[in-house]
């Protein structure tokens, strides 16, 4: 798995809209902190 | 004077269900019956001080059902119309043995504490809160089950707490259960409109989160 394939899911609980997107650089950086 | 059918009928109601209600001292009015299943409710803005109204319903409303995939799952724009929130998380399986973390309102600051069965943290020393077993096994299909309740999530004057209980597959023996319960907390006072779930490392392999609103 490469960093660019990390995905984030967001669900809008009011509209029901669901979005799956690639994690941005800041989010990937946070994951790196978590994994240390 | 005893009230009998004759004396009650002497009021001569015009219709079934009519009530006589005072409107002021020495003055009264007829209040017609309300619709089926409505209840008599006090309302000082009404002439009689009474009205028929639909009772407010209690119970749980399923807000969303979401499959746990990717690096994190965020439940956003959570309706602010309930008293409490309840997360029911089933079959959480991480890509590597790890626990399940939660953040509130997207806050990645060091503002969380986890006091789950045996935890001894006393300060807000983490950037997310634990809400489930410490090390969910990743190598097998998961029987993980967890319930997390967030009371009074819309208030803007207190720190927020999440009461968590559940069990997962044992880290050293996946056929055994690892239980955990307790209270995690977040030291900010704003109303909660967003919850983010993520495995402490790696990604989700499987799992489902049901978000309920509780009245």
Image (tube, coloured by chain):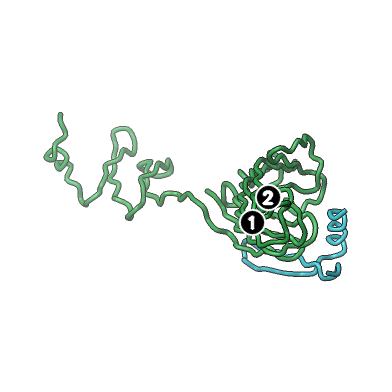
Chain colours: A cyan, B green
Q: Nearer the viewer, residue B103 or B57?
A: B103
Q: Is residue A22 above or below residue B196?
A: below
Q: Which residue is mark 1?
A: B78
Chain holding disc 2 = B
Indicate the quadrant where residue B74 lies. bottom right
Residue drawn at x 15%, y 31% is B2
- Other residues around mark 2 within 10 Å, as few (<14) / some (14–19) / many (≥20): many
Q: Are marks 2 and 1 in contact (CB under 8 Å)?
A: yes
Q: Is residue A34 left or right of residue B87?
A: right
In x, y percent, where is residue B164?
A: 64, 45
Q: Residue B95 versus residue B35: which sits nearer the camera?
A: B95
Q: Secondary structure at mark 1?
A: loop
Is B211 displayed left or right of A24 in the figure?
A: left
Residue B87 in sight here = yes
Image mark for residue B52: none
Task: Locate residue A32, reporting x and y percent.
Answer: 87, 58
Instruction: In this rendered view, identify the residue nearer to me: B210 or B12.
Output: B210
Question: Marks 2/1: CA distance?
Answer: 8 Å
Quadrant into which the N terminus of chain A falls: bottom right
Instruction: Tell me the residue at 62%/62% (across/down).
Output: A14
Residue in view at x 39 percent, y 50 percent: B53
- Label 2 vs 1, first from the N-terminus: 1
Query: Looking at the image, which is closer to me, A11 or A34?
Result: A34
Q: Which residue is mark 2?
A: B192
The reply to whether label 2 and label 1 mark residues of one chain is yes
Residue B90: % across, % down: 62, 57
Circle 1 packing at 10 Å, graded few (<14), some (14-19), many (20+), is many
Left or right relative to B41: residue A18 = right
Outermost residue toward the top? B1
Q: Is residue B102 visible?
A: no
Q: Mark 1 — on which chain does it sit?
A: B
């Amino acid at each position: 798995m490469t960093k660019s394939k990390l995905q984030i899911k967001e669900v809008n609980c009011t509209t029901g809209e669901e979005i799956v997107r690639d994690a941005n650089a800041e989010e990937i950086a946070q994951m790196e902190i978590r994994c240390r | 004077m005893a009230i009998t059918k004759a004396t009650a009928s002497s009021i001569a109601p015009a219709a079934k269900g009519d009530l006589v209600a005072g409107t002021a001292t020495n003055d009264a009015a007829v209040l017609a019956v309300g619709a089926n299943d409505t209840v008599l409710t006090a309302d000082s803005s009404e002439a009689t001080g009474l009205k028929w109204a639909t009772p407010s319903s209690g119970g749980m409303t399923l807000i969303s059902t979401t499959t746990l995939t990717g690096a994190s799952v965020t439940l956003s724009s959570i309706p602010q119309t309930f008293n409490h929130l309840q997360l029911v998380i089933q079959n959480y399986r991480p890509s590597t043995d790890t626990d399940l973390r939660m953040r509130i309102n997207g806050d990645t600051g060091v503002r969380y504490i986890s006091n789950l069965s045996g935890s001894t943290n006393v300060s807000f020393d983490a950037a997310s809160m634990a809400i489930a077993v410490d090390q969910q096994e990743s190598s097998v299909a998961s029987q993980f089950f967890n319930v997390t309740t967030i009371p009074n999530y819309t208030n803007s004057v207190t720190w927020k707490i999440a009461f968590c209980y559940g069990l997962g597959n044992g880290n050293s023996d996946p056929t055994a259960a690892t239980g955990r319960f307790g209270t995690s907390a977040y030291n900010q006072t704003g109303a909660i409109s967003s919850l983010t779930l993520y495995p402490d490392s790696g990604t989700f392999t499987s799992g489902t989160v049901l978000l309920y609103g509780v009245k």
